[in-house]
Image (tube, rainbow, N blue to C red):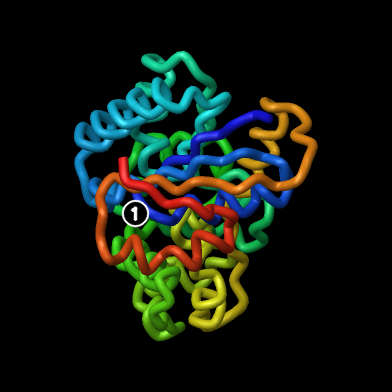
Amino acid sequence: MPTVLVLDSGIGGLSVLDDMLALIPGLAVTYVADNAGFPYGTKTEMEVATRVCALLGRLSERLRPDLIVIACNTASTIALGHARAVLDVGIVGTVPAIKPAAERSRSRVIGVLGTQATVRQPYVDRLSAEFAADCTVLRHGSSRLVELAEAHLRGEPVSAADVAPELAGLLDQPGGDAMDTVVLACTHFPLLLDQLVAASPRRLAFVDGGAGIARRVRHLLGPCDGAALPGTALFTRASAQVDALAPALQRYGLTTIAIV
């Protein structure tokens, strides 16, 4: 049975894992939440690249996965190239879904809602130039939505009113009144899709890259027949917040929790 190591700074990568398990139900998964380094989105590029490469190097040597998925836009846009250069295992990254957003948009105004680190990356410039050259691409970085997604999966109440100011960071920009499609360029954000839809003052399409990542993983691994196997969630720091996440992790098939 192929094994996959999925990495994020927190629980945002669960949105990607959800798509992967829907498409590849027999997948054996170890989910790694680097909560000792959380959040990546407020760190410098050097901090993110150094931390991600060191952690993946240590865990890939220990766990010997068949494939690594960096289920984090920030880590992927900064550290994917570095990790591929130093690790002898296939790595799938997560990048903002600008191409499908541009294909969907009718108004030709799209928004990119991610972390501060992601939205400032030259990678986003290149994606915009290649796939959305005829679009106005608005960007807004939000660390607050990351925190709210974590709280939501711990069972704490998160409402449309809580996320509305972050969405307004796009809508209130010049041209924001014409925006019809929003790229959720942080894997935490699809976990708040219901709240974002409820907070939208008009109908907006929200796009993320989870389904595309799942298709790429299936292509690389081939068929994974058999029943779903219990997965493991590894955290890099023990805390009461980790304990509070246990019910949510079990919903994604992650029945064992450990600290590394």
Describe residue 226's horizontal placement relative to residue 79 as left or right: right
Observer-nearest of 169 and 76: 76
Does 181 sit above or below residue 73?
below
Which residue does the image show at 56% across and 34% down from the upper left? 4
Location of residue 160 (image quadrant)? bottom left
Q: Say how many tags the image has.
A: 1
Q: Is residue 192 left or right of residue 62?
A: right
What residue sits 72% from the left and 41% below the top?
26
Q: Give the structural element (helix, strand or loop) at label 1.
A: loop
Quarter the C terminus occupies? top left
Q: Residue at x 25, y 33 (%)?
A: 51
The answer to which of 1 and 120 lies nearer the viewer is 1
The quarter of the image holding the N terminus is top right
Q: Nearer the viewer, residue 170 or 136?
A: 170
Near-viewer residue (137 or 247): 247
| Residue 202, image x, y percentages | 57, 81
Q: Looking at the image, is 11 positioned above or below residue 240?
A: above
**Three-letter code, disc 1:** Thr
Q: Residues within 10 Å of mark 1 (few under 14, many from 20)?
A: many
Position of residue 104 relative to residue 68, above or below, is below
Is residue 173 visible in the rendered image? The answer is no
Answer above or below: position of 220 versus 104: above
Rendered location of residue 192, percent (x, y): 49, 70
What x and y, as percent, mark residue 14? 51, 54
Q: Residue at x 50, y 30 (%)?
A: 68
Q: Is residue 237 visible?
A: yes
Residue 142 in percent (x, y) is at 32, 62
| Disc 1: which residue | 115
